[in-house]
Amino acid sequence: MPHTFKSLLTRCLPFLFRSDDELHKENLKWSLLLISTLVLSWWAYERSHTVSISDARIASDVVIISSNRSGWISEFTVSGGDHINAGDLLVQIDDRAAKLAMDEMAIQILTKEAEIERSHTERAMVSEEQASRLTTQKAKLESARSNANKANSSWQLAQSNFERTDKLLKKQLISKRQWEEDELKLSQATENQQQAKSKLQQQNAELRQAKAQMMSVELLERRIAIMQQDLERLKVQRQQFALDVEDRQIRSPINAIIDKTFGHKGEYISPGRRLVMLHDPTAIWINANIKETELRHVKPGMKASITIDAYPDEEFAASVSSIDSATTSEFALLPNPNPSGNFTKVTQRLRIKLSIDQQQELLKPGMMVEVSIDTRS
């Protein structure tokens, strides 16, 4: 009540309880009239500046926890009313097979890593061996080319000497023996030239073979690349198995209170089966349905006093946080199109949301409340 009303009422009440000797009937009549007038005035004043709503409830985001895996429930660690923290285990689904599959995949990964390491070592050895062989073959080829050049030069010299000796023999300027010696030298030079040429061809062939064998190093690199891809695939599969194991440990996403459970230890569940309902006790608000005729008096930010049916002797404070943009009838599953033409006008309601602070966890979702919004605030 306003302070002025309380003061007047305090002054007038003693007159009601004085004896007839102290108070005349006229004074009693006027006192009662004054009190009645004050009460009616106060009620009318408050009524004109207050929007009262009886259709209101405490609301919260109720989270339904379900499983995306099938299996036997090996542990059900919570029950209704329990306080839990984010990350706490709620339900454990049997994960033995998933863990065995993950262990098997880990062994395959170790085996593949060992194969890759061995292939790297083999590649290094082959690469070094082939590089050394290629260097040797190049050196041999240069030596054979040098010998071929020398043999060719010797053959040209022997050929020139033999041609000169042959001309001199025809003129009978030298002996037959000299001619035969030069012919023998030419024959030897020709043979040496052929041998040097064959050796050069052989060294060219061996060099080409050495270069071809260098391709084995590239083949080993490709095989290592393929094994590396297989290793990455195995690691992805291991992550999938690890995710399977993790999904079988159903944990709370938030700090919450358990509202209801839907399962027991030893029960078999399928994917999508709901297991736990919970909510954050600190994240609550009030949903109220206001008449459309009173909407013009209500604005976001206005203060409100809350009376909760469960605690009728206590009063709580709240404030209007938002107002819906459509009436509740627009969201009805069965709209009323009024096809017959018989129309009864019904005052529509809009939902408003009021913010309120939790009071020692006294406020619980679903509780009925009465709201009085002070339109002067």
Image: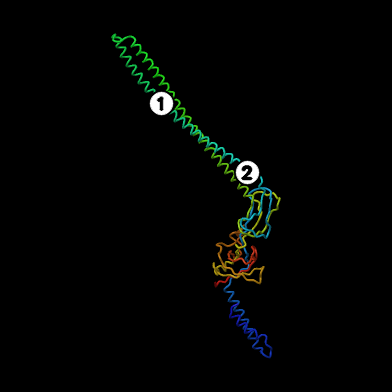
Q: Would you identify the image quadrant in which residue 347 lies?
A: bottom right
Task: Bin the neighbour count of mark 2 within 10 Å (Cα to Cα): few under 14, some 14-19, many 20 and up.
Answer: some
**Where 293 falls versus 77 (above or below)?**
below
Amino acid type shown at disc 1: Ser
Closer mark to the observer between disc 2 and disc 1: 1
In the image, residue 59 lies at what x, y percent? 62, 62
Question: How much space separates mark 2 and mark 1, taking CA atoms?
Answer: 60 Å
Q: Which mark is residue 143?
A: 1
- Identify which residue, 1 or 39, lies in the foreground: 1
On-image quarter of the C terminus: bottom right
Secondary structure beneath dot 1 equals helix
Query: Residue 341 appears in which quarter of the rendering?
Result: bottom right
SS at badge 2? helix
Q: Is residue 124 above or below residue 195?
A: below
Residue 165 horizontal/vertical position (percent) = 31, 13
In the image, residue 133 above or below residue 90: above
